[in-house]
Image (cartoon, rainbow, N blue to C red):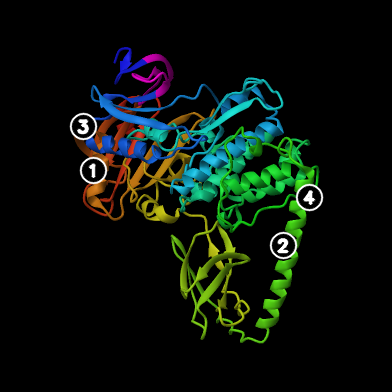
């Protein structure tokens, strides 16, 4: 491509990956330096991949926020796709932490968390979840008073959150590699990501809280050496104490991080801004408890990192008298609210009280817990609790509660109406046991019972592989469900990996995704597995990794395909490995 990319003059190279390169380049018309990401032509021989890449760029382009890396333009040249984005003249937070093994100063932590939270809240308002918040995806620029890593009171300049899916498209490409299966990628993953459950903004809150723990202590919250160890800790281990890892951290911070990293998403802060505000308040304390924001309130937008209100302490020049007046006003408002509430309560004592609902029925399915109850006369809505956590409020008399973490739960229901006092909560349902399993991708595990372990924490799969459920890898699709597995050696290096991609509702989409994964021009050959199942095998290469893709054709596995990859080896060796696998 020479020294020019679509008119951009290349100044230097910022990074190289298996799918392409990222260049520092001069804008062809403006006096501005951009980062230009290029995907090589040999990975883009298919219109499906082209549309996927362009659509992912389009999702990020509308986001205009000082704490999010901007996307400026995209296009094609010489049969390769490129994306022009904001160049951040600094480094990522992972590199800074490597130079600062004891963690950052409180001012630096406040600046970073405020900036990332503001960027996340903006993305969440646009319906996007990041799903990969971690130090390596947080870019930091130089501040006038220092350089990141220098260790001053606050050497953090601008804070930019990157890799909103575009980087994942670049790194993941159209196939499976060992990258993304190492322990490092799981350090900050939420329990619902590991379990393959539904993911929303609260998953990003969890990852931000886990990142915050490392910023304060210098170590991730669960520093296990193995993939299964990290996964098990996220699912079941108590949230560690940051103040135990760093005695300078106020004890109030522990409560904030514990809320942000709650195993149950319903117990977390609803938004990243809420978490950041609670953290900043806790960092101002010596040992007292921080005041946590109500979890049910909407996310709070924070000012960009580096602005005075985003850092610790009062605004310079702020009047203590003004603060006192505001405090008096707040107290007065609270007194009025209490008096008004007492008046309303007195009026409602004479109103009718609704009858309590009968004991609800609760049934576990592979995807959720179905809870149903009989309607109550006069009730217009109901509140449902799972143990002590409110999971629903609305008019329905049956709900589907997304599967919580493994454990035993009971459900209760209260009836509500604007014209009557709420009922007491019903008797609790029969105890409902949720077991560790594959949830939405259980049907895939059932098709390959000797290949896939019984749960994300089990090691009874083929050759002790560790597996997890994840979203679309091969094809930008809401219907794709994938089980990804890897075998690591004693040094945490991936020896081999495999992915089983499934399309439960769309055979045509499965066929299109398989062509993307294996290549349109790859010639298939007959294949017979160790269990005697027949299909077609396709030799192909992904990011210099040799793979064998297997299509079992018509039958019960018709909605899936399997891709077996060797981190080091030939495609023939990948085929021989696939033939030995119990599938």
Distance from Cα at disc 2 to Cα at disc 1: 61 Å
Q: Earlier in the sequence, mark 3 or mark 1?
A: 1
- Say if mark 2 contacts mark 1, CB within 8 Å: no
Distance from Cα at disc 2 to Cα at disc 3: 72 Å
Distance from Cα at disc 3 to Cα at disc 1: 14 Å
The circle drawn on residue 522 is 3
Q: Which residue is mark 1?
A: 512
**Disc 2: CA contacts within 10 A as few (<14), some (14-19) or many (>=20):** few
**Disc 3: CA contacts within 10 A as few (<14), some (14-19) or many (>=20):** few
Q: Earlier in the sequence, mark 4 or mark 1?
A: 4
For the point 67% across and 36% down, which residue is it? 311
Q: Nearer the viewer, residue 159 or 258?
A: 159
For the point 63% across and 34% down, which residue is it? 111
* Quarter of the figure that contains the C terminus: top left
For the point 34% across and 45% down, which residue is it? 501
Distance from Cα at disc 4 to Cα at disc 2: 14 Å
Q: Earlier in the sequence, mark 2 or mark 1?
A: 2
Q: Would you say residue 525 sits in the magenta stretch? A: no
Residue 269 in picture, x, y percent from top left: 60, 52
Residue 37 in picture, x, y percent from top left: 37, 25
Q: Secondary structure at mark 3?
A: loop
Q: Which residues are magenta?
A: 10-35
| Residue 103: quadrant of the picture | top right
Q: Which residue is mark 4?
A: 324
Q: Nearer the viewer, residue 314 or 519?
A: 314
């Amino acid at each position: 491509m020479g020294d020019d990319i679509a008119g951009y003059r290349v100044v230097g190279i910022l990074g190289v990956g298996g799918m392409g390169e990222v260049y520092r380049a001069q804008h062809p018309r403006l006096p501005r330096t951009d980062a230009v990401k290029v995907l090589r032509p040999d990975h883009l021989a298919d219109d499906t991949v082209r549309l996927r890449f362009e659509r992912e760029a389009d999702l990020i382009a509308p986001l205009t926020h000082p704490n999010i890396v901007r996307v400026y333009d995209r296009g094609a040249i010489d049969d390769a796709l490129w994306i022009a984005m904001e160049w951040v003249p600094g480094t990522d937070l992972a590199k800074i932490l490597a130079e600062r093994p004891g963690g950052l100063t409180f001012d630096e932590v406040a600046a970073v968390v405020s900036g990332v939270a503001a960027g996340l809240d903006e993305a969440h308002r646009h319906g996007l979840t990041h799903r990969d918040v971690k130090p390596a995806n947080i870019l930091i620029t130089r501040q006038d008073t220092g350089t990141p890593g220098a260790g001053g009171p606050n050497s953090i300049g601008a804070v930019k959150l990157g890799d909103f899916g575009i980087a994942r498209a670049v790194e993941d490409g159209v196939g499976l590699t060992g990258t993304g299966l190492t322990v490092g990628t799981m350090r900050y993953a939420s329990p619902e990501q590991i379990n393959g459950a539904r993911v929303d903004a609260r998953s990003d809150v969890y990852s931000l809280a886990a990142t915050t723990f490392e910023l304060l202590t210098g170590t991730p919250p669960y520093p296990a050496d193995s993939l299964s160890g990290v996964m098990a800790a996220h699912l079941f281990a108590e949230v560690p104490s940051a103040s135990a890892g760093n005695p300078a951290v106020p004890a109030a911070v522990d409560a904030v991080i514990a809320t942000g990293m709650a195993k149950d998403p319903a117990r977390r802060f609803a938004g990243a801004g809420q978490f950041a505000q609670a953290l900043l308040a806790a960092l101002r304390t010596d040992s007292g408890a921080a005041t946590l924001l109500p979890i049910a309130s909407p996310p709070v937008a924070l000012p960009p990192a580096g602005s005075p209100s985003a850092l610790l302490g009062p605004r310079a020049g702020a009047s203590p008298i003004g603060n006192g007046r505001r405090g008096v006003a707040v107290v007065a408002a609270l007194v009025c609210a209490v008096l008004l509430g007492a008046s309303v309560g007195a009026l409602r004592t004479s109103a009718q009280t609704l009858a309590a609902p009968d004991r609800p029925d609760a049934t576990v399915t592979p995807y959720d817990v179905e809870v149903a109850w009989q309607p109550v006369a006069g009730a217009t809505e109901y509140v449902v609790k799972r143990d002590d956590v409110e999971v629903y409020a609305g008019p329905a008399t049956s709900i589907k509660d997304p599967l919580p973490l493994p454990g035993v739960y009971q459900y209760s229901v209260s009836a509500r109406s604007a014209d009557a006092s709420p009922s007491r909560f019903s008797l609790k349902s029969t105890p409902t046991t949720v077991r560790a399993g594959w949830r939405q991708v259980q049907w895939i595990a059932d098709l390959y019972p000797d290949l896939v372990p019984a749960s994300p924490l089990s090691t009874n799969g083929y050759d002790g592989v560790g597996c997890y459920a994840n979203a679309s890898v091969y094809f930008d699709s809401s219907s794709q469900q994938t089980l990804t597995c890897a075998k690591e050696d004693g040094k945490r290096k991936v020896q081999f990996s495999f992915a089983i991609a499934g399309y439960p509702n769309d055979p045509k989409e499965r066929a299109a995704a398989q062509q993307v994964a294996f290549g349109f021009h790859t010639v298939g050959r007959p294949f017979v597995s160790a269990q005697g199942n027949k299909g077609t095998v396709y030799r192909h290469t992904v990011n210099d990794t040799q793979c064998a893709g297997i299509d079992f054709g018509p039958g019960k596995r018709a909605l899936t395909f399997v891709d077996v990859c060797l981190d080091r080896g030939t495609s023939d060796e990948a085929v021989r490995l696939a033939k030995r696998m119990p599938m």
